[in-house]
Image (cartoon, coloured by chain):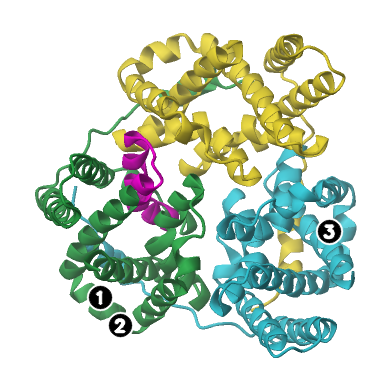
Chain colours: A green, B cyan, C yellow
Amino acid sequence: MLLTTLYIIGITAEAMTGALAAGKHHMDWFGVMLVASATAIGGGTVRDVLLGHYPLGWVANPQYLAITCFAGILTTWIAPQVVRFHKVFVLLDSLGLIVFSVIGCRVAMDMGLSPLICIVAAVVTGVFGGLLRDMICRRPPLVLHKELYASVAFMAGGMYYALMHFAVPELIATVSTLVVGFSIRVAAVQFGWSLPVFRFDEVEQAEEKLEPKA
Amino acid sequence: MLLTTLYIIGITAEAMTGALAAGKHHMDWFGVMLVASATAIGGGTVRDVLLGHYPLGWVANPQYLAITCFAGILTTWIAPQVVRFHKVFVLLDSLGLIVFSVIGCRVAMDMGLSPLICIVAAVVTGVFGGLLRDMICRRPPLVLHKELYASVAFMAGGMYYALMHFAVPELIATVSTLVVGFSIRVAAVQFGWSLPVFRFDEVEQAEEKLEPKA
Amino acid sequence: MLLTTLYIIGITAEAMTGALAAGKHHMDWFGVMLVASATAIGGGTVRDVLLGHYPLGWVANPQYLAITCFAGILTTWIAPQVVRFHKVFVLLDSLGLIVFSVIGCRVAMDMGLSPLICIVAAVVTGVFGGLLRDMICRRPPLVLHKELYASVAFMAGGMYYALMHFAVPELIATVSTLVVGFSIRVAAVQFGWSLPVFRFDEVEQAEEKLEPKA
């Protein structure tokens, strides 16, 4: 119940940031709805396809898809307001990340999968929406470059798994993961935390060697 | 029977336009076959994966895959002719769009899915082939930018669903959807109809705000 | 047993070349693990999703995913050594290609699929890892442009299928496919063999004709 409410808030916020990206690339309304939906529910879709968890969430509950399409189109009208209140959206996006991660972890746990896969399911659910958005819009995938984003999803998934594993009541496990994960994510944004970056520019020349001449 | 014949014509035409895109990017024969097949049967593949509708069409009927690969290679020989008769291909592509949409809708209806998902299945079947082609070839996804393309698939899916829902005989439902959808698509091409485009160029600066500093 | 050992060597080598590509694009550790894993086990994942062959290999055996993530991170430390011994990696990559193709073919055969689909499964398993790597890193897909790569996978799949079909003992079928395929691949690299390339630069102007004005 709590999770469902937060999930709807999360997909709405993600859909609106997806629609802004579509607007930057001058897409038509269909493109806006596609990018909005891919951003908001693409992560869960990739997770379900990888786990063979059918039917997909939005196939079983088409209203979620209707919400993301509607939020996308709405954004074409209220884009300036979305930008003005950008701080709210950063918070909603952080909340969405943790909610998606908890849901992803739980889906995998319900399928009886191993701990590592449950945490991977959390990361995929949290991260692949933004990754799909960036691939459709043909821009560098942000989540792979500079944000403490996937790591927060990883941590949230791990914490939720551990709490449930040690038989903490579900509501407590959910709420404490949400609070801790959200705090870390907001702190990461605030203080500019990020993972180390792997720069290997000799690689261009290295690749010429690694790749066959043909 | 009618649908199968039109489907084969449709995937052949789509495969040939896919092969032209591969030729523009100087791909080798394998690349030509991959792009041709992705363009022609990629939409149905994405639909089946999203709906969990196994086995995929071309896995159950490998001859469809053989046709698209063959049409792709054939195009490397007859590309100038394909271009000379481009008007025929625009018509075949329009026909393919409606045929794919009707088939997509029917697959979802046979699975007993809700009306919205049946229409989404029509759109995915009609549109994702071209989207995959553009992603593999790394060019801006045309269907998201300037064509009345997805909207025609949406409309064709909705019309077919409604006719079948109200127990119109299948042949009549199919033929009238084909005629109406094809006419609208051809008119859209002829008269330059398109959906509104969402341009939001403030978004660059907005994104800097929306995205965490890191 | 033999195949499993070779498979682990193959995914490790592929993960390391994937990590180098991620380093070229200045990705963070998460990006490195994602690209490494996509390169190494992405081909098998796409194959299993297309065939509806669940659970995926790395979901059933999470240790494979752990290996590719670890190999990716390790590469951030030993990248110069990876480059120095690039000839070893070209050999391991060639070995991996054949191993992946044989495994892909066998999965499809175990599912009772038709010969063409078994060979397609071999090609998808061998080729899509590199294709995913290039799509995530937003660079031209190498396997579609200049290498005798997919064709070797095709040939290895076909040879393995034929040997098994004619009841050659499995070990002999596997080993001889590995030896022949590996030799052809290494010869192709050495002597610069490649498939014909389809160049059709009139296509730009052709496309303007083929695409609707809108």
Under tag 3, what secondary structure? helix
Question: What secondary structure is the stretch in magenta mostly built from?
Answer: helix
| Gap between marks 2 and 1 measured at Cα | 6 Å
| Crowd around label 2: few <14 · some 14–19 · many ≥20 (10 Å) | few
Residue B6 forms part of the magenta stretch: no
Under tag 2, what secondary structure? helix
> At 55% across and 69% down in the image, what residue appears?
B144
Tell me the chain of label 2.
A
Nearer to us in this view, B109 or C84: B109
Whether residue B149 sits left or right of residue A138 in the image: it is: right
| Gap between marks 2 and 3 measured at Cα | 43 Å
Q: Is residue B213 above or below residue C43?
A: below
Give the image location of residue B28, x and y in percent: 74, 37
Nearer to us in this view, B82 or B50: B50
Under tag 1, what secondary structure? helix
The residue singled out by tag 1 in the image is A82
Mark 2 and mark 1 in contact? Answer it, CB < 8 Å: yes
The residue singled out by tag 3 in the image is B12
Q: Which residues are magenta?
A: A107-133
Give the image location of residue C107, x and y in percent: 66, 31
Q: Amino acid at mark 1?
A: Val
The residue singled out by tag 2 in the image is A78
